[in-house]
Amino acid sequence: MRTIVFATSNEDKLKEIREILPEAELLTMGGIGFHEEIEENGQSFEDNALIKARAVADYIRKARPDLSDALVLADDSGLEIDAMDGMPGVHSHRWLGERTYREAMEDIIAKLDGLPDEKRGTRFVCAIAAVLPRTEDAEEGRELVLRRTVEGIVARSIRGEGGFGYDPFFYVPEYGCTTAEMSREQKNAISHRGKALRAMREELLREGLL
Ligand code: ITT
């Protein structure tokens, strides 16, 4: 069984990831002894996913040679809101400041008050990066990166208890509910992270790495 180290400290993401990558033994950063804060200072989701995956791959090279055959994956995700010029985007987490998600969502709903559906467009974006194990003739492991999205509209009120982060106001018209009102399986089937992870899984299977 292939070992995958997933470079996240977000437990909610891990629950989603475990369901999509059943053929791998999934380890977390904490699980391999990596406790440093990674500075996500990239300009794009792809940059940040690569920054996270490289930091963990470096750590494995230096401190965990027993894991040299492991694949390292990382995702960087966030929410883009059309009426806010794509904000909060790559800053989706830090943009909260001192607010809870609920407060931040209520602020956005107030800002968009009165806008019709066609002006409430939003999307979740997810970039997944992989650092592949080093081969005998290569200094560095090869890297793969890809991006997927899911489109929605900013709901007029917060709804649902499932998911995490901005899910309770991410309304998907085709399903008539927010991603927080979906089961985990339903959300994984349509979500940015679900799509990106399945695409990465396909790629890894094609390369004989899973
Ligand atoms: P790691 O960097 O440790 O993975 P993080 O929570 O900081 O955890 P990101 O930088 O990738 O993760 O994510 C930015 C934020 O975007 C995340 O904390 C959520 O607020 C939001 N987000 C991402 N995916 C989401 C989803 O599926 N549902 C709701 N909100 C999501």
Image (cartoon, rainbow, N blue to C red):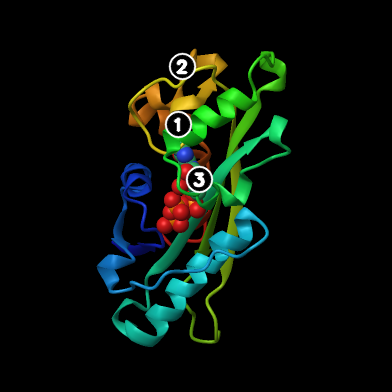
Label 2: state its secondary structure: strand
User: Residue extending furthest front?
Assistant: 98
Mark 1 or 2 closer to N-term?
1
Q: Disc 3 beta carbon < 8 A from ligand 1?
A: yes
Can I make out residue 172 in this image?
Answer: yes
Label 3: state its secondary structure: helix
**With respect to residue 205, does 156 lie above or below?**
above
The quadrant of the rendering that contains the N terminus is bottom left
**Which percent across, then down, holds residue 136?**
49, 86
**Which percent across, then down, holds residue 167?**
45, 31
Q: Disc 2 beta carbon < 8 A from ligand 1?
A: no
**Which percent across, then down, holds residue 20?**
37, 43
**With respect to residue 199, does 121 lie above or below?**
above
Identified at 54% across, 17% down, the residue is 156
Pointer 1: what residue?
Answer: 167
Circle 1: is it few (<14), some (14-19), or many (20+) Cα within 10 Å? many
Pointer 2: what residue?
Answer: 177
Mark 1 or 3 closer to N-term?
3
Mark 2 or 3 closer to N-term?
3
**With respect to residue 174, does 207 lie above or below?**
below
**Which percent across, then down, holds residue 67?**
32, 76
Identified at 36% across, 62% down, the residue is 4
In this view, the residue in front, 132 or 183, is 183
Q: Disc 1 beta carbon < 8 A from ligand 1?
A: yes
As shown in the figure, which amino acid type bears the numbered disc 1? Asp
